[in-house]
Image: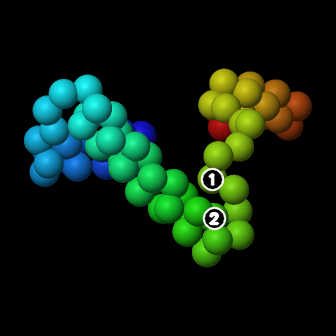
Amino acid sequence: MLAEALTKDISQAVNPEGFENNKTVGQQGGNVAKVALDELEARTGKKVVTAANAKTMLNEKVIRNLESGDPEN
């Protein structure tokens, strides 16, 4: 999502015309997002992108709650 937002902002600032110019803007947005991702991971020591997904995490939470007898959380 960050790459998309950055690409939009760069595109609005540059106003590219044609496919090649838009492609370049897209690459620039992706590059800026990559730098931000690498910096965040370096500072926190944690991976931002993982194999976990919301559905799996929610199912695991529901199972834990059922096992603990607390269906509300």
Residue 8 drawn at (x, y percent): 24, 41
Local secondary structure at mark 2: helix
- Please state the horizontal and vertical placement of residue 55, each as a whole percent of the image: 66, 24
**For numbered disc 1, what is the local secondary structure?**
loop
Residue 20 visible in the shown view: yes
The numbered mark at residue 23 is none
Residue 15 lies, in percent from the top left, at 11, 41
The kind of residue on which mark 1 rests is Val
Residue 48: which disc?
A: 1
The answer to whether mark 1 and mark 2 are in CB contact below 8 A is yes
Between 57 and 63, the residue placed more toward the observer is: 57
Q: Amino acid at mark 2?
A: Glu
Residue shown at 72% from the left, 36% from the top:
52
Q: Residue at x 59, y 62 (%)?
A: 38
Q: Which residue is mark 2?
A: 41
Front in this rendered view, residue 53 or 33: 33
- Closest to the observer: 11 or 48? 11
Q: Residue at x 63, y 31 (%)?
A: 54
Residue 51, how many percent across, how many down? Answer: 74, 37
Q: Where's the N terminus, which quadrant?
A: top left
